[in-house]
Image (tube, helix red, strand yellow):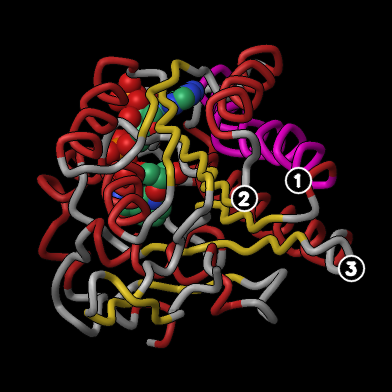
Amino acid sequence: MLAGDIHADGGKSVMAGMLAGKAALITGGANGIGRATALLFAEEGARVAAADLNLEGAEETAAMIREAGGEAIALSVEVSDAGQVEAMADATVEAFGRIDCAFNNAGIAPVNVGNNAKRTHNWSEEGFDRMIEVNLKGVWLCMKSEIGRMLETGGGAIVNTSSIAGLAGLPTSSGYVAAKHGVSGLTRTAGIEYATDNIRVNAVCPGFIATDMTREVMSRRGNELMALVPARRMGEAREIAEMVCWLCSDRSGFVTGATYNVDGGYMAS
Ligand code: NAP
């Protein structure tokens, strides 16, 4: 059924969800943007696999979906480990038969690799490597596992989480910026490569969003950063989820290889 179809339900006309009947895989599904997206996907009719390093959090997300009447499973994954990513994709296919939508969203911030508030020359090599491993290689590994399965089942839609840091420089975030620019490039390239295979690949570029990830930087530089945002506020995780949902739905059927800012106007100023 196409999203937006109207069907009869006991005499009443109801709108089918935007993702009705689709099977979705979401990394970073335990928290923040990933959890908000998992919940919205389920509201819109998708069956959801919430995968995360934090299995307990992913289980909580899946339980929230089931309590609301949806269908969900929780999976444990370290996205920088090829074997674990393959196992995650296998488990999703085992549960739902296919992967129609994938949101490659798990990620870490400079503070998670001990490199917050450091200019480029002060970043540690170890921290830089870990940043690239999770935020860039992790996305590539997920795409690799998902695309193979999508090719087998006739197509799908992938959304990668890039950032405003995937489009512009961001002082004291060099490893993060490098990884996110890489995600934007991977997205454009795969968008071209699979355009005739019915696989669309896009990226969402969030601005400053109120999640655990931004707590530390907001406590240090909140006022300074909000002065750079035309909307003069942080975004909500749900506001990113709305874009991801549209990009994964059939309503964006001609959209591929694109990056979409959801940033309160940050990139426009
Ligand atoms: P979050 O609340 O910290 O959620 C990130 C989730 O990813 C956490 O549950 C985390 O688990 C998980 N994760 C971290 N490393 C992982 C790994 N190696 N394998 C599997 N899972 C892993 O952060 P968020 O703000 O929702 O961020 C989600 C994505 O949005 C990230 O890619 C981030 O770079 C991007 N983004 C965020 C913002 C923002 O302002 N918040 C802006 C632009 C882009 P643990 O908690 O166990 O580490």
Q: What residue do we see at 16% from left, 54% from top?
A: 221
Taking the image as four quarters, which one is ligand 1 found in? top left
Q: Amino acid at mark 1?
A: Met
Q: Residues within 10 Å of mark 2 (few under 14, many from 20)?
A: many
- By secondary structure, the bulk of the magenta-drawn segment is best described as helix
Q: Nearer the viewer, residue 199 or 79?
A: 199
Q: Amino acid at mark 2?
A: Asp
Q: Amino acid at mark 3?
A: Thr
Please tell me whether residue 77 is drawn above or below residue 12 in the rendered image: above
Camera-side mark, 2 or 3:
2
Q: What residue do we see at 85% from left, 67% from top?
A: 192
The residue under label 3 is 196
Q: Is residue 87 magenta?
A: no
The mark that comes first in sequence, 1 or 3, is: 1
The mark that comes first in sequence, 2 or 3, is: 2
Residue segment shown in magenta: 126-151
Task: Report the side of 149 relative to 268 (left or right).
Answer: right
Please tell me whether residue 154 is drawn above or below residue 110 in the rendered image: below
Where residue 173 appears, as percent x and y from the top left, is: 44, 46
The residue under label 1 is 150
Mark 1–mark 2 CB contact (< 8 Å): yes
The residue under label 2 is 100
Q: Residue furthest top?
A: 83
Q: Is mark 2 within 8 Å of ligand 1?
A: no
